[in-house]
Amino acid sequence: MNRPHVSSLPSPASPHPPRSHELQGLGGFTLIELLVVIAVIGVLAALLLPALVSAKEKARRAACASSMRQFSLAVLMYAGDNDEWLPSGASNKGPLDDHLPVLCDATSNAIVTYSGSEHLMSCPSYGDWFIKQQPQRPYEEQEYGCVIGYNYHGGHTNTPWPALPGQSAVWISPQRTTQDPNLVLVSDMNDWSPGYGQTFAPHGKAGPVLQGGDPSNPQAGGKTSAEIGALGGNVGLLDGSVSWKPISQMRIYRGSQRWGDSGCWAMW
């Protein structure tokens, strides 16, 4: 019998590596596809991050407004027990050396008593910073009383205080709850002191402005709150209402009865 020639026998299929399109059919990705996915994720993150930051700041504003309402309620409760007279706005130095964010010991103690918490003495954006700072302040500052994280407008004497240089805005301090309900009772601490070199801005794009981690922003050299990024603040009226006010709608006022450039300048 004649045997077939070896070369005429069918040869087995030779093994070969899978092609790229076969890998795709098995659920794989090419390098280009992975890069496209990463790029899309980056774009989405860039679009969503500002919205998340904005939402977080709006939540801070709401928390601040709630705290300010409770602060106002404590002040009004005090007045209800004292023939409608509001707590004094004087410092421990007396009624002629008073400043919007400084309370005498008697007033600060009364507000804490009526509110039930010392944490209401400051915008929540600042946390416990003002509470912790009290014992660390120089003695000559502690003599004035308690520096709070708000401006308290009630119970100040001799208002309207003169307008600041280059400004025309003046304000009236409410003394009793029976006065004009639209008078400002408390406001966020958009304050600065050109001579003292401190500036506060509790509501920037991403919370309080903290240059170097310090709420008083000494690196700003006494610039205005608006100049370092303040977007606005909450303002509470004598009727107990609280509302947000953009920085563009605020005016600049004298926040200290004395001291000129070394005193408090404020916006609300």
Image (tube, rainbow, N blue to C red):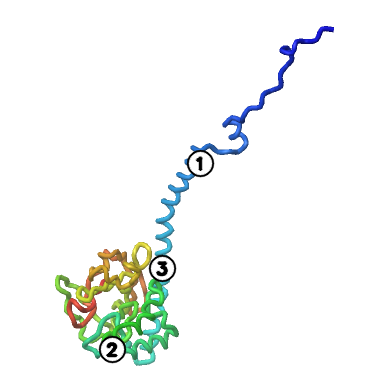
Position of residue 14 in the picture relative to residue 47 (left or right) = right
How far apart marks 1 and 3 lie (CA) works out to 38 Å
Q: Amino acid at mark 2?
A: Glu
CB contact under 8 Å: marks 1 and 3: no
CB contact under 8 Å: marks 3 and 2: no
Callout 1: SS: helix
- Spot the residue most to the bottom: 82
Residue at point 31%, 85% (across, down): 103
- Spot the residue most to the top: 2
The answer, for residue 263, to whether it is visible in the render is yes
Q: Quadrant of residue 146?
A: bottom left
Q: Which residue is mark 1?
A: 34
Callout 3: SS: helix
Horizontal and vertical percent position of residue 190:
29, 72
- Quadrant occupied by the N terminus: top right
Q: Which residue is mark 3?
A: 60
Residue at point 45%, 44% (across, down): 39
Q: Quadrant of residue 53?
A: bottom left
Callout 2: SS: loop
How far apart marks 3 and 2 lie (CA) works out to 32 Å
Q: Quadrant of residue 72?
A: bottom left
Camera-side residue: 194 or 10? Answer: 10
Horizontal and vertical percent position of residue 30:
53, 37
Q: Which mark is residue 169?
A: none
How far apart marks 2 and 1 lie (CA) works out to 65 Å
Q: Amino acid at mark 1?
A: Leu
Residue at point 31%, 74% (across, down): 189
Q: Which mark is residue 143?
A: 2
Q: Earlier in the sequence, mark 2 or mark 1?
A: 1
The mark closer to the camera, 2 or 1, is 1
